[in-house]
Image (cartoon, helix red, strand yellow):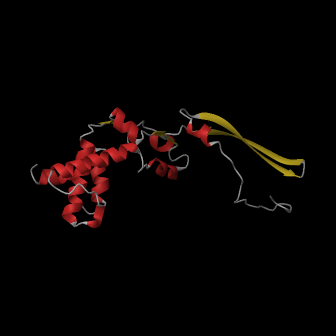
Amino acid sequence: MLQQIGPDELRILNDRDLTLDGSLLSAQTEASRAVVTIVARAGEQELARVTRDVRMLARNEWGGLSGIPDILAAFVLPNDPAIARILRSASEILRQAGQSPSLEGYQGDKARVWAQAQALWCAICALDITYINPPASFVENGQRIRLPTQVVEEWTCNGFVPVRSDYATLASKARGLMPPRYEWRRRGL
């Protein structure tokens, strides 16, 4: 609420009271059009009205670089049930190899970190996921994102879910480890 605005004065409101219907947004399975109307009032008198069409994305849709690219981080879902299944599978792989089934990350030495990365890689490979190429326009216009549970249940994924060597490169090389595929080839496995 602003008490006073002078002629040609610009005020930026940082504390807008905007309420969104979470259940409506969560139920969005397809993109749709909506209308947003902003009204400026002085008491009961309407001073200005602006109406804009907006595109409401489905809950599993990324708008691409033409929208808000940072929202891509919303699709990182470490608490998705499929992630827990993959972690349990990696733990079992370690157990069957005669190692501790614990997934303690970087608390161990380099060999232990490597063993965990390898077990995670093997657990993902065991899913036998098929890569589906994203549409050519996905960078600018976005695309549907297959969430972890959907990837595991349907055995398919698109360009934004790290799969096979891409996953290993992202997860391992960033930590100074060689991707398992490269390491296995180097060792003749």
Residue 44 rendering spot, x and y as whole percentages:
90, 48
Residue 27 rendering spot, x and y as whole percentages:
56, 35
* Between 42 and 11, the one nearer to me in the picture: 42
Residue 133 rendering spot, x and y as whole percentages:
36, 36
Q: Which picture quadrant has residue 179?
A: bottom left
- Number of numbered discs visible in the structure rendering: 0
Question: Which quarter of the figure is the N terminus placed in?
Answer: bottom right
Residue at 30% in and 49% down: 87
Residue at 29% in and 47% down: 88
* Between 93 and 185, the one nearer to me in the picture: 93
Residue 138 rendering spot, x and y as whole percentages:
45, 40
* Between 6 and 4, the one nearer to me in the picture: 4
> Is residue 176 visible to us here?
yes
Q: Which picture quadrant has residue 116?
A: bottom left
Q: Is residue 11 left or right of residue 155?
A: right
> Is residue 179 visible to us here?
no
Q: Is residue 34 left or right of residue 161?
A: right
Extreme residue toward the left, this view: 188
Q: Is residue 44 left or right of residue 160?
A: right
